[in-house]
Image: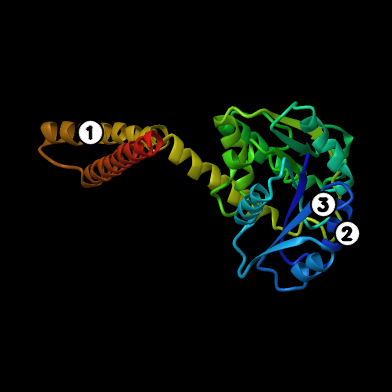
Amino acid sequence: MRVVACIPAKDEEGTIARVVLKAMRYVDKVLVCDDGSTDLTGEIAARLGAEVIRHERNMGYGAAIEALFERAIGLGADVVVTLDADGQHEPDDIPQIVEPMLHDEADIIVGSRFLDSKGDRIPRYRKYGIKAITGLSGKFSHVELADAQSGFRAYSRRALPLVKPSEMGMGASTEIILKAHEAELRVKEVAVKARYGKNSSSLNPVYHGIDVVLSIMKQSSIRHPLIFYGAPGLLSLAIAAFFWFWTFDTFVRTRAIITNVALIAVAMTMVGLMFMTTAIILWVMVSVVRER
């Protein structure tokens, strides 16, 4: 089977050489997406024999993964392994990530940092953040994983075209798992090591978390518009009905209108109608797209 390693990278000149050289021991070809680096990341990878896809400006993790998947499909890859360029993932773990796929045990294999004591090496604040995002991701994607945010993964040829992300940023990891569930692909986890040094995991964890949460909200609004927008719309209309009743009841008894109460009734009615209209329009649009 033809195994291709795909490495998204931005400003990783200090670690890219080690990652590329070690990955070459276990795969047939290494692809690197230089996602708008301002240093020598792309040049180093190319000199070492990797094929480099260059983005003139930083487009985000998801955009880099999409570009790598497209090229891997064009190369006829049977298995694609994704790993980070910052040295967090250990290329020596590639064989154990690929092995279950060689035996047709899964379509996507996720390298988990939390399946054994190896997770103890992760800084505590990152561990809690990853687990919180993983829990939220599991509720949304209906795929229970120990480490849904791991970028160390293996994909089969069948999975690649079905899970190509549309998210530009870090939310792509969650989107891929969601698409895997929708396509009824088999997802499995294996334990891997994680290296956290001063040059590893440079991405701001707060930004990472916010990006993933916003991505989950976006995907949820697209896939379930009647629930995402309809539920708060109905709640707003229910609150509006209460304040309208209060307004009319006061007027009948006293022939006076409580301005603040009436304004709340009007505002909640407008908000509720806006949410309900949005829910119906998006539901119709999504239904049309799916039918096509």
Residue at point 88%, 39% (across, down): 118
Distance CA(mark 3)–CA(mark 2) = 11 Å
Q: Nearer the viewer, residue 202 or 235?
A: 202
Q: Nearer the viewer, residue 174 or 22?
A: 22
Q: Mark 3: give few (<14), some (14-19) or many (20+) Cα within 10 Å.
A: many
Q: Nearer the viewer, mark 2 or mark 1?
A: 2
Distance CA(mark 2)–CA(mark 1) = 70 Å
Q: Which mark sits nearer the N-terminus, 3 or 1?
A: 3
Q: Secondary structure at mark 1?
A: helix
**Three-letter amino acid code at disc 1?**
Trp
Q: Mark 2: give few (<14), some (14-19) or many (20+) Cα within 10 Å.
A: some
**Residue 86 placed where, x, y %?**
80, 58
Labelled disc at residue 88:
3
Residue at point 79%, 60% (across, down): 50
Q: Are marks 2 and 1 in contact (CB under 8 Å)?
A: no
**The image quarter in which residue 273 lies:** top left
Taking the image as shown, residue 247 lies to the left or right of residue 278, namely: left
Q: How many marks?
A: 3
Residue beneath disc 1 = 246
Q: Quadrant of the N terminus?
A: top right
**Residue 113 placed where, x, y %?**
80, 39
- In the rendered view, tell whether residue 122 sits above or below residue 242: below
Q: Is residue 114 visible?
A: no
Q: Which mark sits nearer the N-terminus, 3 or 2?
A: 2
Residue beneath disc 2 = 18
Q: Quadrant of the C terminus?
A: top left
Q: Are marks 3 and 2 in contact (CB under 8 Å)?
A: no
Q: Which mark sits nearer the N-terminus, 2 or 1?
A: 2
**Three-letter amino acid code at disc 3?**
Gln
Distance CA(mark 3)–CA(mark 1) = 60 Å
**Three-letter amino acid code at disc 2?**
Arg
Q: Nearer the viewer, mark 3 or mark 2?
A: 2
